[in-house]
Structure formats: structure tokens, C-alpha cells
Image: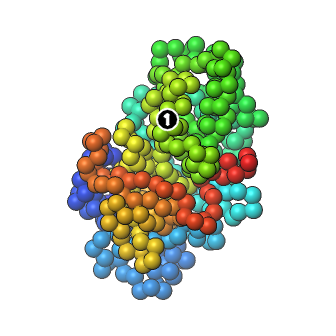
Amino acid sequence: MTFEEIINIPPYSLNEKEKNELLMKRLAELTKCHKDRCIEYGKMLDSIGFDVNKTENYKDIPFLPVRLFKELELKSIPQEEIVKTLTSSGTTGQAVSKIFLDRETAANQQKTMVKIVQEFTGSARMPMIIIDCPGVLKNRIMFSARGAGILGFSVFGSKKIYALDDDMKLDIVGLREFLIQNKGQKILLFGFTFMIWQHFYKELLRLKAEGISFDLSDGVLIHGGGWKKLISEAVSHDEFHKKLGDVCGLKDIHDYYGMVEQTGCIYMECECGKLHASNFSDVIIRRPFDFTEADIGERGIIQVVSTIPESYPGHSLLTEDEGEVLGVDDCPCGRKGKYFKIYGRLKNAELRGCSDTYADKFR
């Protein structure tokens, strides 16, 4: 099954049986492709005697630990076909993952994210406020996860403004003028969770105390990058939503879960506060003591699979995050597929989300 066939299916339309069939076909093809084209991946499969032709369930396809992309340069394309190298977020001194993209894989990542996000925002492009600084995009060759996130979501903006300057200070004048120019229109806001709280919310709160307020009640906010720092400051998911609503009227807020090793296949938070797997990907919860699949409602290590990666063997990965599947096909929001919850990084795992690694440097 080609990716072109998959991209034309509405992202949350398949039930569990239909989606399992799709994933098995596509992931088996990707496994064969990467075994033939990536020497290191082929050796790993050979070392355990794995034969995808004898596999009936995509959950039995071996996963790679995400940390491996920090140790090896895994790619399934010749060097001359690499058009972009994505790097993961990391604190000072950490090794970073390197993800090598060819033109087709990069294009499919973008197409996938557009399909997913439009299910929550609609298809029309909107005036966009990026809650970050423009300096993060200066290095256009080595794309960090933070820069890739900004560029990826920027396609949804008809016109854009950075809410922060390169000193991470709120551009009060620019923000006010932008909102006046786009009064009455739906506004898209995008940023990383800790930066939104530290540099946007706290400044809006200070300004409101001085009698200066901004109305973002027509806005929709998409944010991601990890919660570890905010949780350590006793800022919960619900409080984050409430405080933003109080300070500027924002009510339509969606977290998302994603990683540079599987860019494009993001897991969006629905109106009911649940993260959802689309037709393009899936989450599997593994028990830490034997890596068997956990039951619904049972906490474990998150494995993610993606139908996109053709330029590198990133289609089945074991993360360093803990979570649980809450249900399948029956979320009150009406979207089919698995919905789940993230509890955060495993104990002693390195920080790697854009929000959390920035928070660590900020501290």
C-alpha cells in the first residue's frame, strides 16, 4: 500500500479492524524497504531472525529505541538524496537525534500534518501568532525540532507575526497592531508549552494588572513540547487552560504529542482532552518488564508507528515516554482510533521535548 493511497483517507475515519489492516500492509512494506536499503537496520533484523513475510500483525514488527538515532546515522537513501536533516531538541551536552529526509518523505510529513490539523482548525488559512522568536529559524540547514515545528505549522497561517523578540520579550505593540488588523477573524496561535506560559501568559497577566488587555477569544491555540517543567511548578493541564482563558479569553486550546523521529504524525488533543492516533500512525503501550502489549487503562512505555518514513527506518519506535491507552473508537468527540494519555518521561530519561529542554536551559 502506497502512502498516496493512505493520504486520501480521512484521518479519523477507520475503525480498529480497518486501521489494523492498513497498518499491517504499509508497515510490512516499509520494513522490507528499510531492510534492503539500510545496512544497519538489515543487520539488526537478521540478528534476531525476523522475517516480515511470516508476520501477521504490525505490532510484532521489531521497534527501534528512539535513543538509537543519537548513536547511529540511520538512513535508507544515498547521501546525495538528503534534502533536510532534522535534529531533536536536547539540553547542553546531550547528543541529538539526526533524521535524514529526502524530498518525498519531507513532502509526505507536511501533507500528513496538514490533514490532521485541519480536522481541528478547518481548511481555511488564518492569521497566525507564533509564540516564539524569529531567530530560531536562522539556521535553515540543520533544522531543530523547535524550528521544524514552527515551519510545519506556519503553513496554516495566511499572515504571521512572532509574538516574542529575540530576547524572548513580548512584542506588545506588534501584537496589538496585528489583532487590530485582523479583528473579527479567527486567529491561530502556535507555540511550545513552557514558552507560552513563561513568556506569553505571565506577561499578559502583568499587563492586565496594569489595565492593558488583549482579546484572543476568537483564537485557537495549538501547543506541544512537553509538560515536565510546568508540572514541577504545579501548573496542571486544566489550570493552563483556565489561566489562559482568564487572561485573554482563549478557550479553544489543543495540546499535541509528537517527536522529530516521526515528524508529521502528530497526536492532537481533541475537545474532550484526549490525545488521538490518526490513520497515519498508532500508539502501542508496552509493559516495561517484558515489552508485551499492555491492556487498555494500563500504564507502560509508549511505542509509536508511522506510515510515513521512507528515507530512514523510523516507522516503528520505542519512546522514553510513559502513557496509557484510554479507549478505541469510542471517544465522545466522535473520532475513531485510539485515544490515550501521556504521563511524561520515564524516570532517568533525558529531557528531549522542545518545551522541556528550553525550560531546562531557561532555568
- The picture places residue 235, in percent across and down from the top left corner, at 57, 42
- Regarding mark 1 in the picture, which secondary structure is present there? helix
- The picture places residue 269, in percent across and down from the top left corner, at 42, 43
Q: Which residue is mark 1?
A: 241
- The picture places residue 354, in percent across and down from the top left corner, at 62, 49
Residue 143 visible somewhere in the drawing: no
Quarter placement of the N terminus: bottom left
Q: Is residue 251 above or below residue 20?
A: above
Please tell me which residue is depicted at 64% across the width and 40% down the height of the picture. Answer: 195
Horizontally, residue 58 falls left or right of residue 235, namely left
Please tell me which residue is depicted at 57% across the width and 14% down the height of the picture. Answer: 181
Near-viewer residue (216 or 135): 216
For label 1, the crowd category at 10 Å Cα-Cα, with few meaning under 14, some 14 to 19 and many 20 or more, is some
Near-viewer residue (273 or 209): 209
Q: In the image, what residue type sits under mark 1?
A: His
Residue 291, located in which quarter of the rendered image? bottom left
Q: Is residue 350 above or below residue 136?
A: below
Please tell me which residue is depicted at 45% across the width and 63% down the height of the picture. Answer: 302
Label count reads: 1
Horizontally, residue 207 falls left or right of residue 77, namely right
Near-viewer residue (70 or 6): 70
Please tell me which residue is depicted at 28% across the width and 54% down the height of the picture. Answer: 328
Q: Is residue 256 above or below residue 158?
A: below
- The picture places residue 25, in percent across and down from the top left corner, at 30, 65
Q: Is residue 175 above or below residue 150?
A: above
Residue 19 visible somewhere in the drawing: yes
Kindly give the residue lying farthest to the front in the view shown. 234
Residue 39, located in which quarter of the rendered image? bottom right
Q: How is the image coloured?
A: rainbow
Horizontally, residue 213 falls left or right of residue 14, namely right
